[in-house]
Image (spheres, grey):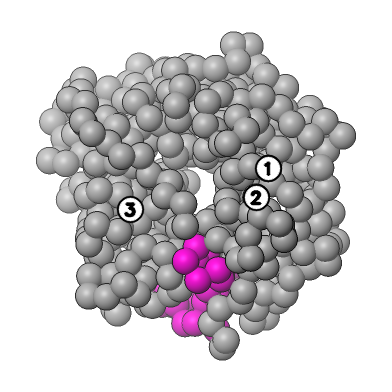
Amino acid sequence: MRARLPQVLLLALLIAIATSCGQMGTGSTSTTSGSGNCVPPAHPTFAYVLSYSSATISMYKADSCTGALTPLNPASVSTGVDNGFNAEEMAIDSTGKFLYVANLGSNATDAATVSMFTVNSSTGMLTPNTPAQVPTGYFPQGIAASGNFVYTANSDDNSVSMFTIATSTGLLTPLSPSETAVPSLCGSCSSQSSPDFVTVGPSGQFLYVTDQDSGGVSTFAINSQTGALTPTNPPGVNGGIDPWKVTFDPTGQFAYVPDEGFNQVWMYTVDATTGTLTQNQTPLVAAGNQPSYMAVHPSGKFAYVVNRYDGTISMYSIEAGTGVLVPNTPATVQAGSWPFPIAVNAAGTFAYVGNQNDGSISIYSISQSGVLSPAGTAQTGSDPTDIALIN
């Protein structure tokens, strides 16, 4: 198992440039003014930020015209597990009704759990389900939800756990069997796999598991009726030295894997029938120092990669027809201290980046050419590791 979180020796003083008082633990938001012609949508956008150290989810309403984040009241909810091995990722189901958190452990034992929440569609508030948690595999660093199913990547028992979602309550039920093994794709690298990330492709037919120990990306076909996983043939591809999570363009034609050990991004084409990833003719594009999470613009024209050591975000345009990433002009924009998660809203107008060392969210407006421009900051919980939006 490879630890993904930095050892933070000193936390920087949290800066809140306030336009109004915020709730304790989340602070307030400072943003630049938006267009006077902006018309807010009928349904608001809600933002959720998972904080590892504080074991909380901060909840916000996002202003569609300025990108500003306003804390809800209460401003945060506990993940339900706070034992030093907390949670790194969360997932929202395709209906936007339920949110799931993969807890690396539990309060009582070493066994890991998934916390389950219901989302209030009017207010955005999260309410723990009853029961609040369900057991999963050991050390589930990654989690994904798609259709009626949820999956966790369990790095310490080399497996993926599989669940069905009860459509009325959001409760998870393990499949039988509840786990499937993830084979190592590099026989000379490791006798076992250590799955760290899991992604469901846009079609909902295939699941992709990243193994940072062996450098492989495994592919599984998803049974549309049961959610059960079957390895594809071939079972996967090389993902480099230290591959991060697989990210797709909206059409599902192209896939990207940041390699934090190689400081590059791998580029693939996707076979719509088999789910197979094939390295692009131009397989790599340079990123910054230790690239991690990545987001693709909903238009499919732009992509963004967070570089943790640099404290920057690399910006790319996506070449139509080939999916090749081409550095934008400028090629990078500054983030906060040790940036990590990133999310882009459905309208493609704002991006949000969590900064682990200073407990903040950097807010960016997105131009017609895909360039990010700083639009404000928001204070959040300690050590943000994931951001999710409901639009």
Q: Where residue 147 sits: x, y (%)?
A: 59, 67
Mark 3 highlights which residue? 124
Tag 2 residue: 215
Please name which of the two marks, 3 or 1, marks the residue nearer to the observer. Answer: 1
**Of 159 and 220, which appears nearest the observer?**
159
First in sequence, mark 1 or 2: give its number: 2
Q: Could you tell me residue 378's position as x and y percent?
A: 28, 30
Where residue 305 sits, quadrant-wise, is top right
Q: Which of pointers 2 and 3 lies earlier in the amino acid sequence?
A: 3
For label 3, the crowd category at 10 Å Cα-Cα, with few meaning under 14, some 14 to 19 and many 20 or more, is: many
Residue 158 locus on image (x, y percent): 55, 68
Contact (Cβ within 8 Å) of mark 2 with mark 3 = no
Q: Is residue 122 visible?
A: no
> Which element is circle 1 on?
loop
Residue 240, which numbered label? 1
Magenta stretch: give its range: 147-175
Could you tell me which residue is drawn at 35 percent across and 16 percent down?
A: 32
In the displayed structure image, the side of residue 6 where residue 166 appears, left or right? right
Q: Residue at x 77, y 64 (%)?
A: 235
Q: Secondary structure at mark 2?
A: loop
Q: Was residue 173 drawn as part of the magenta stretch in this picture?
A: yes
Q: CA distance from mark 2 to mark 3?
A: 38 Å
CA–CA distance in space, label 1 to label 2: 5 Å
Check contact, mark 1 vs mark 2: CB within 8 A. yes
Q: In x, y percent, where is residue 338? A: 38, 30
State which tag comes first along the sequence, 3 or 1: 3
Q: Residue at x 44, y 26 (%)?
A: 309
Label 1 amino acid? Gly
Assign a secondary structure to mark 3: loop
Nearest the camera: 273 or 148? Answer: 273
Foreground disc of the pair 2, 3: 2
Q: Residues within 10 Å of mark 2 (few under 14, many from 20)?
A: many
